[in-house]
Amino acid sequence: MSEPVAVNEAGTAGARGPGAVIGRSERHALGRRLLAEGGVLWSALPIEWPTEGARGSVADPPELPGLWWRVWASVVALLRRPGRSFAYVQEPVAHGAVLRLLLALRLPLWGVLLAALTVQAWLPEGATRLRPVHALLDPRMCEVLSLWLLLMVPIGVPLLYFALGVATHVALALTGGAPRSIAASMRAAGYALAPALIGIAAIDLPLHLGVLPGFAYLILLALVGLSFFHQLGQALTGTHAISPVRGYLVAVVPLVMVLAAQFGRALLVLPDLPGWSPSASHPYFIP
């Protein structure tokens, strides 16, 4: 249970005595008000609110909403107000807050997928289904690689975050210079990736369970890529105060990285691809 909090001059906690405790509904109301006012706190994204510098600010951390409220409020803010979300960047950048948001969005459905695959493993096995990737790799190797990459998701998300940030900053430097630090570029790439991670986690479920055709997966992955591309273009434009044309041009590099990483993972389990047909000469082919 949180410690009692005192009333500040802005009246965020209301007229309470020194022993009063803020309830959940009141914390949520405070969070919504701070979001609506804008510029009151040190960040337009609630996931960054409880930082070391928060003490003595408009609202101390015990007065703010909980983690999951801040996660979803941050996603809504990124989708509805991407320009305002990146108008101000506090240095040094709180990379922990970015990773907290990314993992909070990616891991719940990842856990559901692992549970579903565990149940599926107990079911009777049928014949090995021939997939496009089996023309290059043995089916057993594909199963091992796919499972390993799936188990590596909690580590892969931070690796993807840092790789995207570095590649984005290099692209900025090569196209005219980066007005802000590499940490600011990493923050922009990470928060732009957050909404796309929801889509990636959602389409991973039917993909790995074997109920999503290859053509449908490619369409869904393209939509996720468009969302990431738009968000990153806005993020770079706001973070570095550059022209939208340059922001979207630089966003092509991390977009290719994200699509390549996701398609590479999916190729190990995709049941079909447009234009592909199983070869009768393959040792696993069943007529």
Image (tube, rainbow, N blue to C red):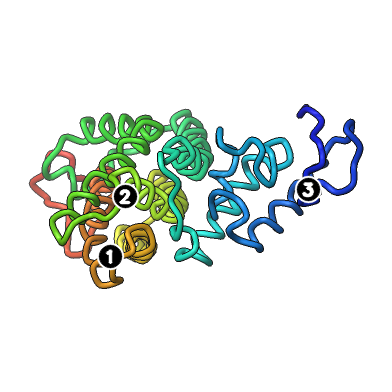
Amino acid type assigned to the residue bearing label 1 in the image:
Gly
Q: Residue 163 or 225: which is nearer the viewer?
A: 163
Q: Say what secondary structure mark 2 lies in.
A: helix
User: Residue 163: x percent and y percent?
Assistant: 26, 41
Q: Quadrant of residue 44?
A: bottom right
Q: Say what secondary structure mark 3 lies in.
A: loop
The residue most toward the front is: 9
- Where 73 sits versus 268, above or below? below
User: Residue 37: x percent and y percent?
Assistant: 65, 62
Find the distance from the CA under tag 1 to the CA under tag 3.
Answer: 41 Å
Q: Residue 62 or 278: which is nearer the viewer?
A: 62
User: Is 204 left, or right, of 1 in this rendering?
Assistant: left
Amino acid type assigned to the residue bearing label 3 in the image:
Glu
User: Residue 54: x percent and y percent?
Assistant: 61, 38
* Residue designated by label 3: 9
Give the residue at x 75% y 46%.
27
User: Residue 280: x percent and y percent?
Assistant: 11, 50
Q: Earlier in the sequence, mark 2 or mark 1?
A: 2
Crowding near the residue tagged with mark 1, few <14, some 14–19, many ≥20 C-alpha atoms within 10 Å: many
* Residue designated by label 2: 185
Amino acid type assigned to the residue bearing label 2 in the image:
Ser
* Residue designated by label 1: 247
Find the distance from the CA under tag 2 to the CA under tag 3.
Answer: 36 Å
Q: Residue 240 or 220: which is nearer the viewer?
A: 240
